[in-house]
Image (spheres, coloured by chain):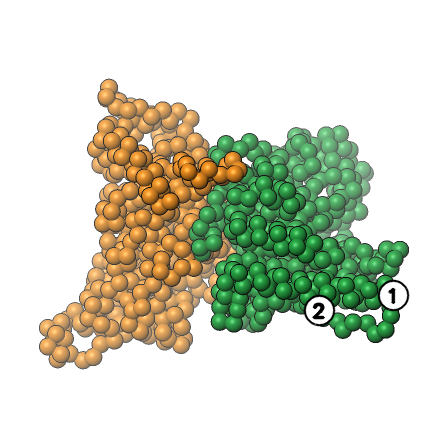
Chain colours: A orange, B green
Amino acid sequence: MKNHLLCALCATFVTAAGAGAQTVAITGGTVYPVSGAPIQNGTVLIRDGKIVAVGADVAVPANAQRVDATGKIVTPGLIDAATQLGLVEIGGEPTTRDANARGTDGVAASFRSWDGLNSESVFWTPARNEGVTSVVVAPGGGLIAGQASVVDLVNATAAQMIRRAPVAMVAQINNPRGAQTGARGELIGKLRTLLEDVKFYQAHRADYDRSAARSLTATRADLEAMIPVVEGRLPLAIDADRVDDIQGALRLAKEFNLKIIIVGGAEAWLAANDLAAAHVPVIAGAMNNIPNSFQTLNQRQENLGILSKAGVSVAIIGNNGDGDEELFNVRNVKYEAGNAVAYGMTHDAALRALTLTPAELFGVADHVGSLQVGRDANVVVWSGDPFEFSTRVEHVYIHGQEVMSPSRQDMLTQRYKTLPPKYETHP
Amino acid sequence: MRTTSLFLLCVVGVACAQTPAPSTAPSPSGNATAASASTAPRDSAGRPGMGALSLPNANPFPSTYVPFPSRTTLIRNATIMTAAGPTMQNASILLRDGKIVAVGTSVTAPADAVVIDGTGKYVTPGIIDVHSHLGLYAAPGGGGLNDGNEATNPNTSNVWAEHSVWPQDPQFPRILAGGVTTVQILPGSANLFGGRSAILKVVPSRTVQGMKFPGAKYGLKMACGENPKRVYASRGPSTRMGNVAGYRAAYIQAAEYRRKWDEWNANHKGAPPTRDLGQETLAEVLRGDVLVQMHCYRADEMAQMLDIAKEFGFKVRAFHHSVEAYKIADLLRENGTGAAMWADWGGFKEEAMDGIRANIALVDAAGVKAMIHSDDPSGAQRLNQEVAKAMYAGRAAGINVTEDMAIKWMTINPAWALDLDTRIGSLETGKDADVVLWSGDPFSVYSKAEKVWIDGAMLFNRDDPAQNWRTDFDLGFVNGGAR
């Protein structure tokens, strides 16, 4: 069974790799570069894995493979800004879970989550087939969960999939118990102490190594890993929902001069102006409106629209209901965006929140997130509005290679479409 | 705070300036205190009728639901998806005295009717969600509201979901705003036998009795597979074969219990047999008065359950979750068993690995009663979107799924699963006026339920937020309430 699946995938990708070397011209579609205004009847020209031209008047070389996108929509590949895809396969099966480090007293800053990335996850393909070309893979748990990476959904080794790492240090201030503390104030105190210790360590490294420094609350490896955070070079992505926790994170960021991102942000709309003034972005889903905990009492579907209108940078993630099926449905992030639009976000802003904004937040906007000359050719051709259920994905290019291939789900569908199934065949 | 939020509501897509629709705000008076409208009827043999239980105690918690005050209402110029026939364009629907009295292209408005212009809008039956835990896992959650799994014994057929339902769960008005008008509340899936379900109208009430769908049959929640064997790993069952032994042992006992009671009911000789709440429920399953609603993921387990049902002479009304229903759609059809499914959940445990998006379409195409379900308070608010995903996935798989077929997955087919399809689930004359007016095509990501009627009473109106149902919990705790 496993061999069959692998073979089927191999065959597809050998073909794809061959096609990728040539020049591809996607013509006639409405092109949304995201970095600029939409282009009617536009052309996107791809060569050697890069975008070499975008516009209405692009000369198509004679040798280019032409893809007719007339009547269709062309966008950058989508980016899901927070997932555990590749770290968790079957949530209920602990041997396939590599997202949560044990850490030391709630701190796992040195945890490079991508070191456990599973390039053979069966969930890359369905995500990729539906237009997701990069994801931010983030660890969870504790106070400091560890480091996140940006992963491209190419069919390659784990090392080749990792576009940039680390791109953020992940923390949470929602759950004092999870942080090995007993109360919110204690959690913030612990975080403050950690940040002070990192600064102390940075200034007294030699003393520390001679065991001549005062004792510090974290391990050497964790203190080292936190240095880019206290230097403001690496964003601290803080899971925070309650408005007071979000405000607390803003104060802490100011106090320590940190670059932070609010993740989850259930009540962020109540702090929209403060977030905008502090230039702190928010990463959130768009379908949460249930007061399903005492820290999310005021979450509402208008959250992203309100934040966006207030000038906050927002990225949309697929966390509808925080369901266990998140990995299975990274592909549904586009519908999350549709729901954001239904509740007040503009369509342009929602598309940006799935492409260029996450690329900017995680330092990869020079490579992905927009259709501009010199960017990676991560391009999706849609039959219509990317956020609509009726729309089909027609082509997905990553690094200029067409990457659509049958997912395990497609194979099952094919096998059981006519009953009884034929076990000796595979699609 | 409060002012801010109301202001924001006005800015964000809600037409505050619009003339308010006739106020049909839910009024708490009446429904919970009304005299029982549904004391179980009895047939000529004295047996309890539809929705009632076995003797000796046929209906200990009778429904006190009565419809909310309604006005004769005509929605006209709308696209009407009836779930009983082809979609009608430029059509009208007339609601009077809680019932649908006319649907078609030549319906005229009586003089007293409230007329609603449906131009550009869609009308569907109220959505029915056959798999919900609302009120059992009520928001905001926490241990104090964790009332969904009586995980103290693998067989708790003696418990009834309605005894856990908190009517002030703020999730109820939210699913109403998603167009859900009837909901089956099921106990969780920790146990082989989880207990009785509750069929509720999604209406404000002080009591669960005030929400109970009059005359609806009870369901019995059963569960296959990983959950029971995981929960009871240390005491058993700890394997799937242990699960099966557990179902069979229970039905052997229940058959005996039923025999004793049927005998006593027939001749009243001697002292009545000792009552046992769990056995009572299982005996009612064997009599066909309680419908088995069974959590089951894998095809092979569903096939075994169908054999167990035959062994003891009952029916599985519908498998729930049934992520592998597509693998045995032929078997389901032969057994007359329905399947309630998600659009695209899978992968979160081993028995969920084979979920596919074309599941509902494939099962429907095989001639099975196929339906969507939520199992989730977020998904329950957007079952139209879930159906849309499933419908387009079916088409992508080469199955000719029309919108007229797909609309049934969230209306008449779930009504069938509850044995309520003669009363709700389609827009036909004489049926309960459970109706949703959508801002556009319900299979578009941008469409919303604008107005929702239950038994002809408008209980949700997106254009008039101040009139909409807010639970006790919402007051103060949630923005918009007094602080």
- Judging from the image, mark 2 belongs to the subunit labelled B
Residue at 55 percent of width and 62 percent of height: B243
In the image, residue B124 lies at what x, y percent?
65, 41
Q: Is residue A3 above or below residue B266?
A: above
Foreground of the two, A223 or A101: A101
**Residue for badge 1:** B267
- Judging from the image, mark 1 belongs to the subunit labelled B
Q: Is residue B138 above or below residue B109?
A: below
- Front label number (2 vs 1): 1
Q: Amino acid at mark 2?
A: Leu
Q: Dot 2 surroundings within 10 Å: few (below 14), some, or many (20 or more)?
A: some
What label sits on residue B277 in the rendered view?
Answer: 2
Q: Amino acid at mark 1?
A: Asn
In the image, residue B19 lies at what x, y percent?
65, 45
Q: Dot 1 surroundings within 10 Å: few (below 14), some, or many (20 or more)?
A: few
Q: Quadrant of residue B254?
A: bottom right
* Marked residue nearer the N-terminal end (2 or 1): 1
Residue at 65 percent of width and 32 percent of height: B87
Residue at 25 percent of width and 70 percent of height: A195
SS for dot 1: helix
